[in-house]
Image: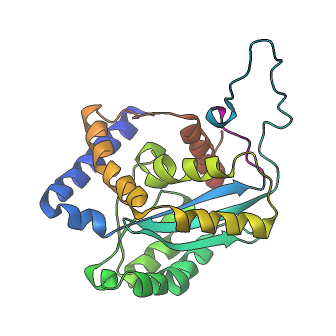
Amino acid sequence: MSDDHKRARQTICQEHLDRHAREVDAFLHRTVIGDESWVYHYEPDSERQSMQWKHPSRPANKKFKTQASAGKVTLTIFWDVNGPIFVRFQEKGQIVTSAGYSDMLVNELKPAIRSKRRGLLSERVLLLHDNARPHTAAHTVDTLRDLKFEVLKHPPYSPDLAPSDFRLFGPMKEHLGGHKFADDELMEVIQNWLKATPKSFFLEGIRKLVDRWTKCVAKQGETISVSTLVKKVIIKFLLFNDLPL
């Protein structure tokens, strides 16, 4: 990252910390996280999942497939301290656009919030999503203004400050690891995993934001951690925004 990017990260994180100090947990409880991720029909086992004890005299187990399959669906999810609010799987051949994203916000996310998080709309939703083009295009900005959603600032190139990236997608894909699924089956398995995941998992994910904002400020905007997952998220961001790898 450039020095300007680091300063932006530090400034935005300090603004969020100042607001959290004023509003305390009410700030976090109004926050809704939105994000997208590709989910593959086959996710290879993680290194941790693949670790097995074997006798020294036995040969190592063969790994027949170590890469994700070409088949995939796009998962869009919105969640908060209480868990998932709305989950959508993008149809094959479709990409996330500003028009499609805006339509989803109005016709699917807002009704889901009204039915599952009563009172949140009147309190005003604080939406945290990344800076992908469908999220920042003028049409989307106008839609969010009409919905009276407040968008929390998110610095560019900062998956380490995005809860879905550092909290949600890794465990979800680890759960899928080593299994091959058809489209419908994959969607069902993900939905069941989300339903079975305790509320405390999501609450902790939102709370970790405060820790990460604090670390970012202390490190003067430097990246907090760059794991394999974060690297994949950066690549996803570049591809979604037609930027060079």
Dominant secondary-structure state across the stretch colored magenta: loop
In the image, the segment drawn in magenta is 42-47
Q: Quick one: quadrant of the N terminus?
A: top left
Q: Where is residue 94 in the image (x, y as percent from the top left)?
A: 74, 69
Q: Is 44 in the magenta?
A: yes
Tally of numbered tags: 0
Residue 58, placed above or below residue 203: above
- Tell me residue 43's x, y (percent): 73, 47
Query: Does 153 sit above or below residue 106?
Result: above
Between residue 123 and residue 63, name the one nearer to us: 63
- The residue lying toward the viewer, choosing from 217 and 204, is 204
Can see residue 202? Answer: yes
The residue most toward the left is 22
Q: Does the magenta stretch include residue 160?
A: no
Residue 22 percent location from the top left of the image: 13, 60
Of 110 and 234, the residue lying toward us: 110
The residue closer to the viewer here, 240 or 218, is 218
Q: In the image, residue 175 lies at what x, y percent?
A: 63, 51
In the image, taking residue 19 as reference, residue 91 lies left or right, namely right
> On the picture, is 148 further left or further right than 238?
left
Residue 157 visible (yes or no): no
Vertical relation: 41 (above or below) 66: below
Q: Is residue 210 left or right of residue 240?
A: left
Coloring scheme of the render? rainbow
| Residue visible at 35% across and 81% down in the picture | 148
Side of 184 relative to 110 (left or right): right
- Quadrant of residue 235 within the rendered picture: top right
Q: Residue furthest top?
A: 57
